Amino acid sequence: MSQHSPEPDDVFAWIDDAERAREQAGLVRTLRPRPAASPLLDLASNDYLGLSRHPETVRGAREAAERWGAGATGSRLVTGTTELHAELERELAAFCGFEAALVLSSGYAANLAAVTALSDRGTLVVSDAGNHASIVDGCRLSRAGIEVIPHSDPEAARKALGAQAGRSMLVSDSVFSVDGDAAPLAAYAAACRERGAALVVDDAHGLGVLGEGGRGALHAAGLAGAPGVVATLTLSKSLGSQGGAVLGPAKVIRHLVNTARTFIFDTGLAPAAAGAALASLRLLRREPERAGRAREVADRLYGRLTASGLTAARPDAAVVSVRAPSAAAALRWAAECREAGLSVGCFRPPSVPDGISRLRLTARADLTGDEIDRAVETILRTAPAGATDC
C-alpha cells in the first residue's frame, strides 16, 4: 500500500500550529514599515552617533551612487570591487589600528566569513554563550569542533582552549547586544596567547562608541593590530550606513578573499552604502567627541531608570537594557511607549539567551537633554506591574 501523501493545501499545515504557539507565548514578530519622517523619538535603532541622516553621510551616499551606479554589479572578485571599496578598507583599517580590512555586504556576512574561513574540521572554536546569532551561525557552518563557554568567563575559555592539541580560536562579541555589557577582552586575549589560539572579536557595538575617538573596543583594550587578533564589525550602527568588514593581519585578509564564501559568492556592497560609511568615518575622525557623548547618554538613561526602581544592566557602551516581567509584558510595554511617541526595542526569546525579556534602548549621541527626559518619563509611566521586581 502506498503511503498517503498530503494534499497540496496541507503541506504547510504545521506552520499554523507553530504560529498559534508563538501567539500563546507572546512571541509573534511583525514587520512595521516606518515613514521617512517618523514622529517617534527613536531609542530603538542602532544609529548610535546619529549619523544615518547626517548631511555628510547622505551626501556621501548620493555622490557614490551618481558616480558608481546603484549597485556593485557583481561579486567583488568579478566586477563588484570599486576604488571606493578599496578606499573605505584602507581608512577603516587605519582608523581602527589594523593592517588590512575587507568590506562585505553585511556585518552578518563578515562574521560568517571570519569564523568559517579561519577554521575547519580539525579546529576547536570556543564561543561565548552570549554571542550574536551571526557568530552562532558561523560556528555551525564552520564544521569545526564547537565549545560554548559561560558568558564572559575567561577561565572557562582557558580550560577549553587548553584541551585542544591542534588549531583553536576564541570568538566573542566585544559588547553584547542584549544587555550592552562588554566582554573581558584583555583576559580573553591572555587566554589565547597562553594556548596559541586566535582571537576573533565582533566589534559591531564598540566601533564609534568605545576606544579613543570611537576606534572600538579592541583599540581600547590595546589589542588592535595584534598578530593573533581579528575584528569584525558592521557599517550599519555607528556609521549609519550598511555593510560589514573584517579587519586583521594582511595575510588573514588575503586568505578570506580566497576562501570566505560570503565574500566570494556574494554581490559586493552597493557603492552608496560604501560612500555613506566612508563619509561617516571621516566625520567621526573630525568629531571624536561623539563617542563620549553616546556613552554619557547611556549612563544618564541607566541612572534615571534604575533610580526609579527599574532593573537595568549597567551599560558599557551605548545599549541600555531594561528587564520586563514577561515576554507579553515587554511587548505591551513597547507598544504603549510607541503609542506615547517613543520607539524602543523589545527583546524576547529566542533573541535573549537567558530567556528574560527586555526593553532595549539605544543611547544616541544626538539625543538632547529634553529628549532624554521625555524618554525616561514615558518608560516609567508605561511600566507594567512587576517591572520593579524583575
Image (spheres, rainbow, N blue to C red):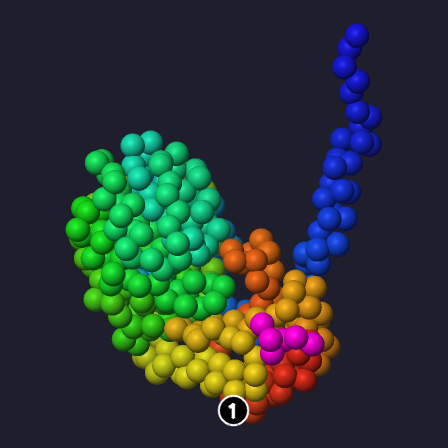
User: Residue 284 occupies which quadrant of the picture?
Assistant: bottom left
Figure check: 142 above or below 278:
above
| 259 or 30: nearer the viewer | 30
| 275 or 386: nearer the viewer | 386
Query: Is 3 situated left or right of 351 in this image?
Result: right
Q: Is residue 95 visible?
A: no
Q: Which residue is mark 1?
A: 369
> Under tag 1, what secondary structure?
helix
As drawn, the residue found furthest toward the top would be 1
Which residue is at a point 60% across and 78% down the rendered structure image? 388
Which residue is at a point 69% across and 76% down the rendered structure image? 385
Span shown in magenta: 385-390
Query: Is 345 situated left or right of 206 in this image?
Result: right
| 253 or 332: nearer the viewer | 332
Figure check: 126 above or below 330:
above
Looking at the figure, which quarter contains the C terminus?
bottom right
Query: Is 6 situated left or right of 245 in this image?
Result: right
Which residue is at a point 29% across and 45% down the rendered structure image? 160
Measured as percent of width and height from the top left, residue 229 is found at: 24, 54
